[in-house]
Image (spheres, grey):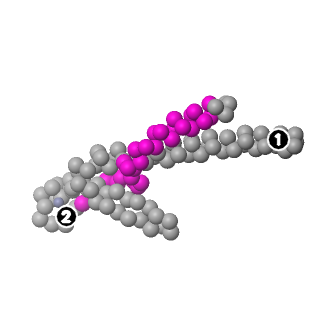
Amino acid sequence: MTREQAIRKRDRLAAQLSAASGVLRGSLLQRTLRHSSGCLKCARGEGHPLWVLTVGYPGGKTRQVSLRPLQVPQVRKALQHYRDFKQTLEAISELNQFLLRLDREDFKDQEREA
Ligand SMILES: [Zn+2]
């Protein structure tokens, strides 16, 4: 890969990060809520599905946000967006590392000529 190819690829990837406002970190879990008495659904063993967004923080802390069923598709999309965003950011960093190494070789030649 040439320097120009790396720069073009990096800038194309960076343009994809313009939609950062849609990102959401965490995992989507489905739990089942069960009433101990007085609920026909739970008496039949069905229970009530409950969606929870769990987000981990440094130090092992976790925050949980319970969701309305209608929020689930939107949350799923935002979680995927976060993963894509992170992957793109990582790819840009790798390209910049590649460019850094190319620069290092150029500087070495310049130092030799000087
Ligand atoms: Zn119930």
* Position of residue 111 measured from the top left corner of the image (x, y, whole percent): 84, 44
Q: State which quadrant residue 34 falls in.
A: bottom left
Q: Mark 2 and mark 1 in contact? Answer it, CB < 8 Å.
A: no
Q: Is-magenta flag for residue 16?
A: yes
Q: Main secondary structure of the magenta part?
A: helix
Type of the residue with mark 2: His
Q: Which residues are magenta?
A: 5-33
Number of numbered discs overlaid on the protein picture: 2
The answer to which of marks 2 and 1 sits earlier in the sequence is 2
* Position of residue 68 measured from the top left corner of the image (x, y, whole percent): 23, 54
* Position of residue 103 measured from the top left corner of the image (x, y, whole percent): 73, 42
Q: Is-magenta flag for residue 71?
A: no
Left or right, residue 114 beside residue 4? right
What label sits on residue 35 in the rendered view?
2
User: Pointer 2: residues within 10 angstroms few (<14), some, or many (20+)?
Assistant: some
* Callout 2: CB less than 8 Å from ligand 1: yes
Under circle 1, the secondary element is helix
Type of the residue with mark 1: Gln
Query: Which residue corresponds to the image point at 66% horizontal and 44% vertical from the top-left?
Result: 97
Q: CA distance from mark 2 to mark 1?
A: 75 Å
- Residue 47 or 86: which is nearer the viewer? 86
Give the residue number, with chain letter if any, for mark 1.
110
Q: Quadrant of the C terminus?
A: top right
* Position of residue 4 measured from the top left corner of the image (x, y, whole percent): 64, 31
Ligand 1: which quarter? bottom left
